[in-house]
Every structure is written in structure tokens, then in C-alpha cells.
């Protein structure tokens, strides 16, 4: 639940920086899509040691006073990639 007066946005992690800082590319509405924001992780993510990697989709909140910084409040769970065509292309090992 966001704090009162905070703006919420969704983005993708583009770069991982030192000290649990991340560069996030925003997506969604036309006005904010494509902008990059410097963000850190929230206390709950830090407490429960939620790992964030490049390419993860995250929700963040920003104050209306500084739209170049934000706080990551959640990470979208990764969906498993199932690609059956790759297993068919590889030959099975022969037993000689």
C-alpha cells in the first residue's frame, strides 16, 4: 500500500548499481514511458532479502517533488519459460 501523496509506476530494471541501487526504465503511461529513474529497495524487500536482477519488472513509488528517484516496493514474480522446441532440436545421447 503506497504512502499518501506518492506516485506509483511500473518499470524494468536496466542496470544494477552499488549499495542496492538500481536504474529503472519506466513503462506504462505516455508521459512517463521510457524515462529512467534511480531507485533503491524498500525496507520490506531488504528485510526479507528479495533479490532483484536485471530484466525484472518492479513496482516503485516516487515523491512528486523529485521524479528522478524512487523506491522499489515490489518485484513481479518470474514466470517459468517453457520452450519444448529446444528439447526436440537436440539429439539424444546415444548409448554405445
Image: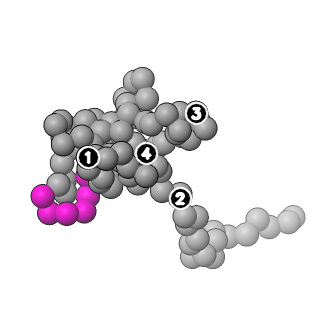
Q: In this orientation, which residue lies closer to the viewer: 5 or 80?
A: 5
As drawn, the label of residue 73 is 4
Vertical order, 11 against 21 (above or below): below
Residue at screen point 56% across, 72% down: 83
**Residue 80: quarter of image:** bottom right
Look at the numbered discs 3 and 4 and tell me whether their residues touch, using CB distance below 8 Å.
Answer: no
As drawn, the label of residue 47 is 3
Vertical order, 14 against 76 (above or below): above
Which residue in the structure is indicated by mark 2? 78
Residue at screen point 60% across, 75% down: 84
Mark closer to the chain start, 4 or 2: 4
In this picture, which residue range is highlighted in magenta? 26-31
Vertical order, 5 against 96 (above or below): above
Tell me the SS state at disc 3. helix
Which residue ends up furthest to the right in the rendered image? 96
> Would you call the spot at circle 3 few (<14 residues within 10 Å), some (14-19), or many (20 or more)?
few
Of badges 1 and 2, the one in the foreground is: 1
Mark closer to the chain start, 4 or 1: 1
The Cα–Cα distance between marks 3 and 4, rounded to whole angstroms, is 12 Å
> Would you call the spot at circle 2 few (<14 residues within 10 Å), some (14-19), or many (20 or more)?
few
Q: In this orientation, which residue lies closer to the viewer: 29 or 66?
A: 66
Mark closer to the chain start, 1 or 3: 1
As drawn, the label of residue 88 is none
> Would you call the spot at circle 4 few (<14 residues within 10 Å), some (14-19), or many (20 or more)?
some
Viewer can see residue 55: no
Which residue ends up furthest to the top in the rendered image? 19
The Cα–Cα distance between marks 2 and 3, rounded to whole angstroms, is 20 Å
- Residue 29's x, y, as percent? 19, 63
Amino acid at each position: 500500500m503506497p504512502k499518501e501523496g506518492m506516485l506509483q509506476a511500473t518499470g524494468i530494471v536496466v542496470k544494477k548499481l552499488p549499495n542496492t541501487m538500481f536504474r529503472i526504465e519506466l513503462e506504462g503511461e505516455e508521459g512517463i514511458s521510457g524515462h529512467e529513474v534511480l531507485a533503491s529497495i524498500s525496507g520490506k524487500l531488504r528485510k526479507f532479502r528479495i533479490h532483484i536482477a536485471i530484466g525484472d519488472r518492479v513496482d516503485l513509488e516516487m515523491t512528486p517533488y523529485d521524479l528522478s528517484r524512487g523506491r522499489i516496493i515490489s518485484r513481479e514474480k518470474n514466470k517459468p519459460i517453457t520452450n519444448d522446441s529446444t528439447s526436440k532440436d537436440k539429439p539424444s545421447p546415444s548409448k554405445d
